[in-house]
Image: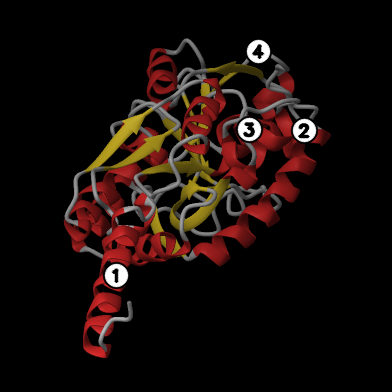
Amino acid sequence: MSLPRRAFLATTAASAATLALLAATTAPAHAQAWPSKPVTLVVPNPPGGVVDTSARLLSDPLSRLLGQTVIVENKGGASGNIAYQQVALAPKDGHMLLISYSAYHVGNPSMFSKLPWAQKDFAPVALLTAATNVVAAHPSVPANTLKEFIAYAKANPGKLNYASQGNGSLSHVGTALLEQTAGFEMTHVPYKGSGPAIQDVLGGQVQVFMTTPPSVMGHVQAGKLKAFAVTGKTRHPGLPNVPTTAEAGLGNFELEAWVGLFAPAGTPPAVVQQLTEKVKAALATPEAKAMADRTGIEIRYLGPDALAALVTRETDYWGQVIKARNIRAD
């Protein structure tokens, strides 16, 4: 039996509406509005230091812009690999993100024979911050300038101990590069992050620590540590009396750390785009800028494509350094 035209059209419209409703209710979760729940920033270091600080200067303004809670979760240890694996295996929906430390991201692939993650497991979202490094020492070290420090280290090979945030951290690989560049040797003592390392440097258990300003700036200003040089192109505003390595006589040595935001690979491009736009806005807030100035790090936003290019360049550079120094973490 055929239906009248009006009844047929009504039936067809109702069927289309039913199909549309079914499609909407069965759509993948990532197609729904993002974010639909709190966003977690996983930090591969303990509290303290430039990586943790970068996450915390971002979290509050980003939370307001997203209208969702942004949680900072510290997962230190294993040269960052615990945190990296956690995010690599996370749902690809933009609700768990990695605050990535440059040394782990570009150095670990050359230092470990086997990793529980790969760079391809992550989608670049934004570069957040960058920081110079400070060559700092306990007051017991008999030197007041970088030249005097290098001369003492050369005359006493292996006598000085230097701290790092862990095997493969920038303080580890960067100090090894300083040794290679200046021609001396010290003994490496790895820690699980800047916090534990700085406590032993202050106590004199280890004598030297090359790290980002947030870890040492206050102690240098208070006279509890010496600062021989900063490793950037210009002096640090929080340490105006500390020369650059070039000014101190080591013109062929510079070292910089960066911190970036990454999502699990496969996160929808629309979510990544929304994320990078919100991150850019969050980093531009007076609140974020004030915290960066107070802790001595530089906000330096880059978008996904520029961050991907940075990772490629630095993976090649640090891979060569690591192989030349035969640095292994396993």
Please indicate whether residue 182 sits to the left or right of residue 88 in the image.
right
Residue 166 seen in the figure = yes
Q: Which mark is residue 183?
A: 2
Query: Which callout, 1 or 2, points at the residue further toward the start of the chain?
Result: 1
Query: Which callout, 4 or 3, points at the residue further toward the start of the chain?
Result: 4
Query: Which callout, 1 or 4, points at the residue further toward the start of the chain?
Result: 1
Give the amino acid type for the residue marked by disc 2 in the picture.
Answer: Gly
Residue lying furthest front in this view?
1
The residue tagged with tag 4: helix, strand or loop?
A: loop
- Establish if 15 lies above or below 72: below
| Label 1 – label 3 distance at C-alpha | 69 Å
Location of the C terminus by quadrant is top right
Q: Which mark is residue 15?
A: 1
The residue tagged with tag 3: helix, strand or loop?
A: helix
- Residue 156 location, x and y as percent? 70, 17
Q: Which residue is mark 4?
A: 159
> In this orientation, which residue lies closer to the viewer: 36 or 75?
36
Residue at coordinates 21% horizontally, 52% vertically from top-left? 63
Residue at coordinates 45% horizontally, 22% vertically from top-left? 138
